[in-house]
Amino acid sequence: MGINIALVSKSEEKLYGVLQEIKELCGNSVEYKAFPINFTRGVEVYPELQKELEDLDIGILINNEKLISQPNFEYFIELSNSKNHFIEMLNCNVLSVTRMTGIVLPKMLQKGKGVIVNVGSIPSKIDSPFMALHGSTNAFVEKFTMDMAQEYKDKGIIFQSLTPGTIVSNTKNLEASTILFPTSEAFVNKALKTIGKQTQTSRCISHQLIDNSFNFVNFVSRKRSSEAATKSFKQLWLQGKRKFHKKLEGEKNCEKIN
Ligand SMILES: NC(=O)c1ccc[n+]([C@@H]2O[C@H](COP(=O)([O-])OP(=O)(O)OC[C@H]3O[C@@H](n4cnc5c(N)ncnc54)[C@H](OP(=O)(O)O)[C@@H]3O)[C@@H](O)[C@H]2O)c1
């Protein structure tokens, strides 16, 4: 008998496409449920989802939703003025992970077993000025998971924080995969083998090396690594501003000509 599967994802069309693929792979021995939900909508999406999930016996929760990034390198004040983008980031990157954990954990505790894997990414490891909200929401996923792992380790619940580097997940770019940029399939195969063995991992040796080198640089001189990150991210912010002003000037010139 296989594991029954419940999928939550944003776009309905893609969700049912993935569901179909899984059905073809796993056949009729498995039950499936699918819930198209956009986590950026915040607290309003959970009561209904909780009701739907109530009767299911969930043994493994994988919080793998794409964490929202900032559109550009920018000062927080610029981001906080742009179309509630920062609220959507908090809803998707922080609230979804905590609410989904809160929904499945009670039943896992009753059974005395369960696995919760939260997927973040490497920005949680480095100082991210001009990307502060992106970096810190990724760091939240990691810290929350590590703390929960300690809190629930005697109750049979395994928590794992996965912090990958770049993964080639777009099927059109599969030939671009290398040892540094593995395919999602290769990454997942390796990551699954670490559940229950490693509470925090970047899995895949290349990403672990990047991860360890950040830890090493921070260990040698936190101040210097902070300064270096600030310098290079500020440069990227400036480049973005220059591009934006060039585009604006181009548009104004076009208007004059017309
Ligand atoms: N790809 C990378 O290079 C990379 C690097 C580091 C970390 N990661 C992490 O690895 C995980 C998977 O990444 P991926 O690139 O494979 O992501 P993805 O395929 O773009 O998205 C993963 C899933 O999240 C769903 N999703 C996206 N936004 C959502 C929202 N607002 N509400 C509900 N569901 C939403 C997607 O649904 P739709 O398909 O409908 O959009 C999809 O099912 C993420 O946690 C990501 O942060 C990825």
Image (cartoon, helix red, strand yellow):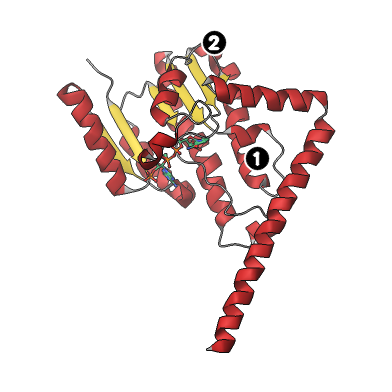
Amino acid under disc 2: Asp
Question: Is label 2 in a helix, a strand or a loop?
Answer: helix
Mark closest to the chain's N terminus, 2 or 1: 1
Q: Residue at x 60, y 70 (%)?
A: 247
127 versus 163 height, above or below: below
Residue type (three-letter) at the residue carrying disc 1:
Ser
Q: Position of residue 211 (x, y in %)?
A: 63, 25
Q: Position of 192 compared to 255: left or right?
A: left
Tell me whether circle 2 and circle 1 mark residues in contact (CB < 8 Å): no
Q: Is mark 1 within 8 Å of ligand 1?
A: no
Give the camera-side residue of 17 and 42: 17
| Residue that mark 2 sits on | 154
Q: Which residue is mark 1?
A: 136
Helix, strand or loop at mark 1: helix
* Whole-number angstrom distance, CA of label 2 to CA of label 1: 29 Å
Is the N terminus in the top left, top right, bottom left or bottom right quadrant?
top left
Q: State which quadrant residue 54 falls in.
A: top left
